[in-house]
Image: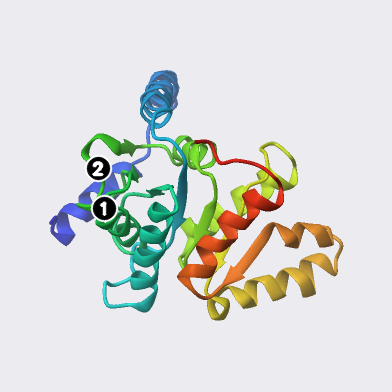
C-alpha cells in the first residue's frame, strides 16, 4: 500500500506541465500504446464467451448490502451460463468477481491504472486480468464483449459507463442489449430527473427511457438479462 506522500508525488508527476515539443512526441508514441492495448484486449476477450458486466463503486465496503447483492448477482449469472466482467478493482467490482469465482465461472477484470483508489482484486482469473492506461480503450471492451450491463450504485465512473451505453444504443452505433439499474432508492431520482427535466425539454424521446430497467433483487437483475434475449428471440454470444 502506497503512503499518502507517494500518491501525491505520482499525481503531481501525472499532471506536470510539458513543453509543446514534449506533447507532440508523447502524442505520437501514444498511438502505438493505444494500439497495443486494443490488440492485447481483443486477443484475450475474443475467447471468453458470453459475459455480463457488473459496474459499481470501488468504495463500497464488504459489509454493505450492495456488495453482498453484487456477489449474489454474479453467482446467479454464472449459474445461468454467463461469465462476469468487472472493472477489476475493489468494492462492487471485487464482489462481482468474487461471486463468479464462487461458482467456478469466468471472472474477468478490466483494470484501469490510476494514481489512487484502483487496484486489481484477487478474485479475477489470472489469464483474464487486463490492465489499461486509457479509459476509452477499456470502455470499448466493456461494450463489445458484454451481453448486458448490471449497474450497481456507483460514482462518476459508473455514471460514465451507464451513459456511454445509453448513447451508443440510442444512436444505434451498437446493437441493443439489456441495461439493469440495481437499487430503486439509488437510481430512482436520476430516472425521475430524466423524465421531468430532460424529456420535458424534448432532449430525449420517451422510448429512450425504455432502454433501462430498475430492480431491487439479485433474481430480478438476472431475470431481466434472460427475458431480454427471450423477448427479442436473440441469443447471447455463446
Query: Residue at 85% of width from left, 70% of height from top?
Result: 200
Q: Nearer the viewer, mark 1 or mark 2?
A: 1
Quarter where residue 106 is shown: top left
> Dot 1 surroundings within 10 Å: few (below 14), some, or many (20 or more)?
many
Residue 146 percent location from the top left of the image? 50, 43
Residue 151 percent location from the top left of the image? 51, 61
Asked whether, in this view, residue 54 is left or right of residue 165, the answer is: left
Determine which of the numbered discs, if any, sits on residue 125 in the image: 2
> Dot 2 surroundings within 10 Å: few (below 14), some, or many (20 or more)?
some
Whether residue 204 is visible, yes or no, is: no
Figure check: 33 above or below 58: above
**For the view shown, which residue lies furthest in the bottom direction?**
185
Query: Residue at 54% of width from left, 41% of height from top?
Result: 143
Q: Which residue is mark 1?
A: 101
Residue 44 percent location from the top left of the image? 36, 28
Figure check: 73 above or below 147: below
Whether residue 74 is visible, yes or no, is: yes
User: Pointers 1 and 2 in contact (CB under 8 A)?
Assistant: yes
Determine which of the numbered discs, if any, sits on residue 142 in the image: none
Residue at disc 2, secondary structure:
loop
Query: Residue at 61% of width from left, 53% of height from top?
Result: 178
Amino acid at each position: 500500500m502506497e503512503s499518502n506522500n507517494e500518491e501525491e508525488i505520482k499525481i503531481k508527476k501525472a499532471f506536470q506541465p510539458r513543453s509543446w515539443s514534449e506533447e507532440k512526441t508523447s502524442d505520437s508514441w501514444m498511438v502505438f500504446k493505444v494500439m497495443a492495448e486494443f490488440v492485447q484486449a481483443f486477443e484475450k476477450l475474443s475467447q471468453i464467451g458470453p459475459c455480463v458486466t457488473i459496474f459499481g463503486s470501488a468504495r463500497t465496503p464488504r459489509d454493505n448490502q450492495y456488495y453482498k447483492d453484487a456477489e449474489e448477482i454474479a453467482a446467479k449469472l454464472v449459474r445461468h451460463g454467463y461469465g462476469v466482467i468487472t472493472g477489476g478493482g475493489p468494492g462492487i467490482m471485487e464482489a462481482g468477481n468474487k461471486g463468479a469465482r464462487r461458482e467456478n465461472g469466468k471472472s474477468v477484470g478490466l483494470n484501469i491504472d490510476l494514481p489512487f483508489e484502483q487496484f486489481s482484486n484477487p478474485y479475477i482469473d489470472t489469464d483474464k486480468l487486463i490492465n489499461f492506461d486509457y479509459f476509452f480503450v477499456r470502455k470499448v471492451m466493456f461494450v463489445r464483449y458484454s451481453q448486458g450491463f448490471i449497474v450497481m450504485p456507483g460514482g462518476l465512473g459508473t455514471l460514465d459507463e451507464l451513459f456511454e451505453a445509453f448513447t451508443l444504443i440510442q444512436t444505434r452505433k451498437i446493437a441493443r442489449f439489456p441495461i439493469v439499474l440495481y437499487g430503486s432508492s439509488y437510481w430512482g431520482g436520476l430516472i425521475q430527473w430524466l423524465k421531468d427535466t430532460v424529456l420535458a425539454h424534448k432532449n430525449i424521446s420517451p422510448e429512450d427511457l425504455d432502454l433501462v430497467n430498475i430492480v431491487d433483487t439479485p433474481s430480478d437483475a438476472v431475470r431481466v438479462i434472460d427475458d431480454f434475449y427471450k423477448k427479442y428471440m436473440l441469443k447471447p454470444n455463446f
